[in-house]
Amino acid sequence: MVDSLSDNNKNKMESKMAEEIKSESETKKEDWMNSKWRPMMGWMYMVVCMMDMVVFPVLWSLLQATTHGSVNTQWNPLTLQGAGLFHIAMGAVLGIAAFGRTQEKMAGANNGGMQPVAQSVITTYGTPQVAPAPIAPPTVRPVPRQPVLELEPDDPPTRNTRND
């Protein structure tokens, strides 16, 4: 009976070790997916845009040139159909993902082995401020009077045409 209890304990310990090993590998797979889905979305969006805006139009023109001898119709980008809803949706997904990752970094999450970036802005909110020195009123100096030039009665009247 004692042997059967020890065998049961051994079996339980072995199953726990197998579960721990299995859960570590599952955790690694889950961690990879959790940490790489944002870049994968960006890569996918870049590939779709590149194919739809660059590669497919060139292939479409080559196909028409080889079959008909001339290019009769233009390529209509598939992602721009439906009012460009694909680009709007991908912009929302990538924007929210970038915002979420920023929040994770600020909260201290360290996915992918990167070190969190330290905040470089020093705020002074709530610290006592020193009152500025009073501003002295400007000093007023009298403007010297220019002597008035008297014209002789026989001098002809002149006009300043250069606005000096």
Image: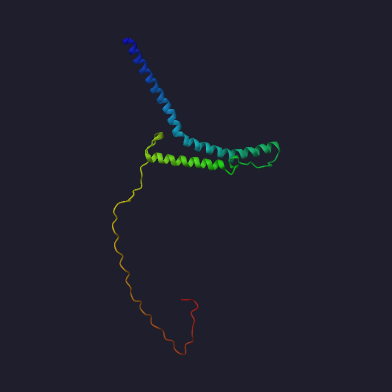
Q: Residue at x 39, y 20 (%)?
A: 18
Q: Is residue 134 above or below residue 62?
A: below
Left or right? Give the position of 151 relative to 48.
Answer: left
Q: Where is residue 47 shown, x and y percent of the image? A: 54, 37
Q: Where is residue 33 shown, x and y percent of the image? A: 46, 31
Find residue 152 and report its image quarter: bottom left
Q: Is residue 162 above or below residue 6?
A: below
Front in this rendered view, residue 7 or 49: 7
The mark tally for this picture is: 0
Q: Residue at x 46, y 34 (%)?
A: 36
Q: Where is residue 137 shown, x and y percent of the image? A: 31, 69
Query: What is the basis of the colouring in this image?
Result: rainbow
Left or right? Give the position of 6 relative to 22.
Answer: left
Find residue 146 and report its image quarter: bottom left
Quarter of the image that includes the N terminus: top left
Find residue 72 and report its image quarter: top right
